[in-house]
Amino acid sequence: MGDEISMKTRALFFLLMLCSVSLADNSQTQIEHYDEIFSAINEQRKGLDESELKNISDPFIRTKAANHDNNSSFSNTFALQAIFNNKAKINGKWYQAKDNVGEYELANISSKSVTLISKDEKIDLNLTKGANKNVVIKIK
C-alpha cells in the first residue's frame, strides 16, 4: 500500500512537471515574440534628407486671407437702424460724424436722419417709425 501512494505521488509529480515545462516553454515563446517587437522598435529609422523634404508638397490646405477693406466691401444699400448720443447705427455698425461708411462720409447726424456724402452723390437716411414694435421708449 505504501508503494501505491508513492506511485500516485510520482505520477502527480510527473504530471505537474510536464505542465510547468509546457507553460514555461509557452512563456518563453511569448518573451521571444515581444523581444522581436521591441528590437524592431529600437532600430534607428532613416528619415528623409533635406532635399527630399523640400520636394514634398505641403499636406495642409492653406486658404488665402480675405482682404476686407471697409471702404470697398460695403454694399450701396444702407439701413439706418438707430441714432443715439450723436452716433448712428448703419447696417449694424456704429458711426460718428466724419466716419467713412463704405465709400461715403457721414456728414451730418440729426435726431431722426443722417446724411452720407460721396464725391458724386448725397444720401439721406431716415429712421423708420415703428420698425420694431417690441421696443417702447418713454421719456419722463
Image (cartoon, rainbow, N blue to C red):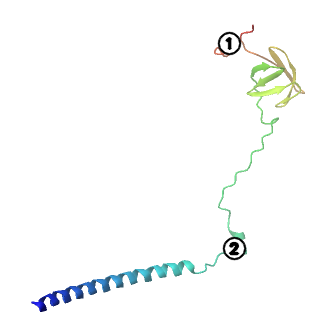
Identify the residue shown where x is 61% and y is 80%. Answer: 44
Identify the residue shown where x is 72% and y is 70%. Answer: 54
- Regarding mark 1 in the picture, which secondary structure is present there? loop
Instruction: Identify residue for label 1.
Output: 136
- Regarding mark 2 in the picture, which secondary structure is present there? helix
Identify the residue shown where x is 57% and y is 79%. Answer: 42
Instruction: Identify residue for label 2.
Output: 52
Q: CA distance from mark 2 to mark 1?
A: 70 Å
Q: Is disc 1 surrounded by few (<14), some (14 to 19) or many (20+) residues within 10 Å?
A: few
User: Looking at the picture, which amino acid does disc 1 mark?
Assistant: Val
Q: Position of residue 2 (x, y in %)?
A: 12, 90
On the rendered structure, is 3 left or right of 27?
A: left
Quadrant placement of the C terminus = top right
Contact flag, marks 2 and 1 (Cβ < 8 Å): no
Q: Residue furthest front?
A: 2
Q: Position of residue 35 (x, y in %)?
A: 48, 81
Q: Which quadrant would residue 24 be assigned to in this image?
A: bottom left
Q: Which quadrant would residue 99 be assigned to in this image?
A: top right
Q: Which mark is on residue 103? A: none
Numbered disc in front, either 2 or 1: 1
On the rendered structure, is 81 left or right of 33?
A: right
Which circle's residue, 2 or 1, is located before the other in the chain?
2
User: Looking at the picture, which amino acid does disc 2 mark?
Assistant: Glu
Q: Residue furthest left?
A: 1
Quadrant placement of the N terminus = bottom left
Q: Nearer the viewer, residue 26 or 66?
A: 26
On the rendered structure, is 122 left or right of 1?
A: right
On the rendered structure, is 1 left or right of 53?
A: left
